[in-house]
Amino acid sequence: MRLRTKRWHTTTWQLVIMRTAAALAAGLVLTTSALAQNELRDTFFKEADAAKAAADAANAELLAPRSYERGMKEYRDAEQYLERGSNIEYVRSNAADAANHFKTAAEAAELAATALAQVMKSRQDAANARAPELQPEIWAKAQREFGDAIRLLERGDLKGSKRRDIEATSLYREAELLAIKDQYLSETRRLLADADRARVGRYAPITLGKAKELLAQAEKELSENRYDTDLPRSLAQQANYEAKHAIYLSEVVRKVRDRDLTAEQLVLEWEEAMRLVAGAADIPPNMQTGPQQLANELADYVDTLQVDVQRLTQEQEENTLRLEDMSEELRALDERLGGATEERAALIQRLEAQARVKEQFERVEKMFGNEEARVFRQGNTVILRLVGLTFDSGESNIKPQNFDLLNKVEKAIDVFPRSELIIEGHTDSFGGDDFNQKLSQDRAESVQQYMINAMRIPSYRLIATGYGETRPVSSNETESGRARNRRIDVVIRPNLETS
């Protein structure tokens, strides 16, 4: 029994050893075969791989699909022949044919990129505007025309390709414009559709009509200049407001019509809101002849608060700087022995000069009303923000009605002898950047020339600079904010030695 067991173990081990040896031999054969196959691939596919890379770089799959697909077919066939271990001549022949097709595709793609440059740009612009998502039908139609233009060009039909090129360009531009309008005007259209379903026009026709007019203006602006979206976006926002306001007003009017709310109750309800604001401002809510007087008083109160806040901010900055300056210089003086008296005297003189600038600033501040100019300081620099100096739209000529204000500006400048004057022109954000930059520069130079001719100020004291829309002081999203951003600032830099 033991002898049989021993013989069985010996046989088993012999089988294991034989199978292992066979597996190692098979693996060696496979490895050798894979290495040989890689060497053959490097040999026969070198030219085809280079040609394919060049075709891909030229975007041939899109611009020369016929030749590129032929190249890919030959390329795949060559790979399959190589994997199956077929006749080497088959591999060599298919790889060579693939290389030739890829070269043809690259050349055709380069020609198409030049011949179809306009339609390709229109296609990219439409894609950037999310036309495939927002205008899928027109985009798909444009894609078909574009594909036909490419195929005809690849076959040598230049005339037919040009016709499809023109049609595709038109469709892409249409899809782009409609997609841009969808992005900026879809909410407005939805609100107006809701208003029409609710028959808002029956109860608030004026406000609803204004919303529709603003929407039409926004669409017109986008149609004329689809890439300058500041104004259309603002018009759409205003239209949204008016549409929502119309819906609210229609509900109020409907309540009044149905006698759920009397006209007197409505007026008292609106007056209560003004009473709350008047109470916060500590102004008697006198509305015995209507709300206009109270509204004017509240507006003046807010203006006064803004001026006070500006003045206090300036004084705080000045006091902080003055204290830091004095502390630093006095500390330095205390550390030194020689020349202390003279340097202390120089410090005192400079502080006195700064005090004179403050006194002069207060004199100038009293020269202007709130509707003419806002006067404020930045350190020792005095700024006249000429809110009353206006220009016609897109123009830079000074109008005669502004002469009185400019006469006051001359008197303000005289308060600071030998000061350096910088005339800054600013615009709102509507219109192109380049146009706004030039317009602001032209307006600044117009004021500069007036100062030279009418005020007899030497030109070496004057600098005119246009900043376009780059330095807003208010939001460009509201009409009043844009009006404040369209301005001329006269910056006065006093000569402290003569102030």
Image (tube, grey):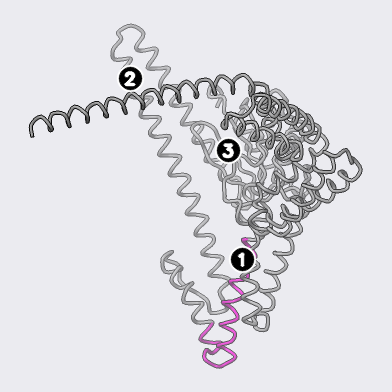
**Residue 250 on the magenta segment:** yes
| Figure check: 118 above or below 333 | below
**Residue 203 on the magenta segment:** no
Q: Mark 2 highlights which residue?
A: 330
Q: Quadrant of residue 66?
A: top right
- Tell how many labels: 3
Q: Quadrant of residue 138?
A: bottom right
| Figure check: 127 above or below 467 | below
| Figure check: 268 above or below 148 | below
* Picture residue at 73% right of the left edge, 60% below the top: 219
Residue 31, how many percent across, how many down?
Answer: 45, 23
Q: Mark 3 highlights which residue?
A: 383
Residue 50, how many percent across, how many down?
Answer: 66, 23
Mark 2 closeness class: few <14, some 14–19, many ≥20 residues within 10 Å: some
Distance in Å between CA atoms under marks 2 and 3: 31 Å
* Picture residue at 56% right of the left edge, 82% below the top: 251
Q: Earlier in the sequence, mark 2 or mark 3?
A: 2
Q: Nearer the viewer, residue 381 or 431?
A: 431
Looking at the image, do the residues carrying marks 3 and 1 touch, with CB atoms under 8 Å apart? no
Residue range of the region highlighted in magenta in the rendering: 237-266
User: Please, what is the three-letter code of the amino acid marked with disc 3?
Assistant: Ile
